[in-house]
Image: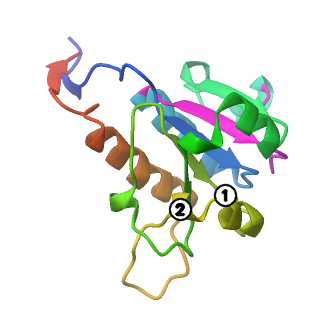
Amino acid sequence: MSPLRLRVDPPSEPLHVVLVEPEIPQNTGSIARMTAATSARLHLVGRLGFRIDEKAVRRAGVDYWHLVDLQQHVDLPHLAHALPPERWLLFSATASRSYLDAPYLPGSVLVFGKESVGLPPELLARYPEQVYGIPTSGAVRSLNLSNAVGIVLFEALRSTGALASPRLAP
């Protein structure tokens, strides 16, 4: 008999997690697993720092890749065509407002930048009212991308009511 786990129904409108030019396959793998576990859609934008073909994914031990709702976009204009920028919430280590104050809605688009430099400065400058960050108290420059996505994704789920009414199920 399988152990029971805490479950919720998938949200009526999924959240979208966008990674712009991710560089580290382990981070993207962890984020992919998180999106599969939360019924969110994963969007990869631009040039990736690794391959995501079946052989590469299998070699990395990612056995849940088939559960990921994945879309790839050549660049940010193509993403904007698929998901209007009005729905975007941009996350940056240099933000002046907390992710706790972001106006999450069902179907929100959570946009994160590459591990080494974050989101392009021109993108942050173009949508300054849509930029949020995760406050920290320590001396580190920023959080790991996978950790940041997890913090924001679960807050978005909580604040949109998607985590309400959990139940035990196999």
Q: Looking at this view, is 94 or 116 the one in front?
A: 94
Q: Is residue 168 visible?
A: yes
- Residue at 55%, 81% in the rendered image: 141
Residue 139, position in %: x, y? Answer: 46, 88
Circle 2 SS class: helix
Image quadrant of residue 123?
bottom right
Residue 51, position in %: x, y? Answer: 81, 38
Image quadrant of residue 31?
top right
* Amino acid beneath label 2: Glu
Residue for badge 1: 113
Q: Is residue 33 magenta?
A: no
In terms of secondary structure, what is the magenta stretch mainly? loop
Residue farthest to the top? 1
Q: In the image, 138: left or right of 129? A: left
Q: Is residue 49 above or below residue 169?
A: below
Badge 2, how many Cα within 10 Å: few under 14, some, many 20+?
Answer: few
Residue 102, position in %: x, y? Answer: 40, 55
Q: Is residue 51 visible?
A: no
* Amino acid beneath label 1: Gly
- Residue at 49%, 34% in the rendered image: 35
Q: Is residue 46 magenta?
A: yes
Residue for badge 2: 129
- Region in magenta: 39-53
Q: In the image, 31: left or right of 134? A: right
Q: Is residue 133 above or below residue 28?
A: below
Residue 69, position in %: x, y? Answer: 59, 23
Image quadrant of residue 118?
bottom right
Q: Which quadrant holds the N terminus?
A: top left
Q: CA distance from mark 1 to mark 2?
A: 17 Å
Residue farthest to the bottom? 139
Circle 1 SS class: loop
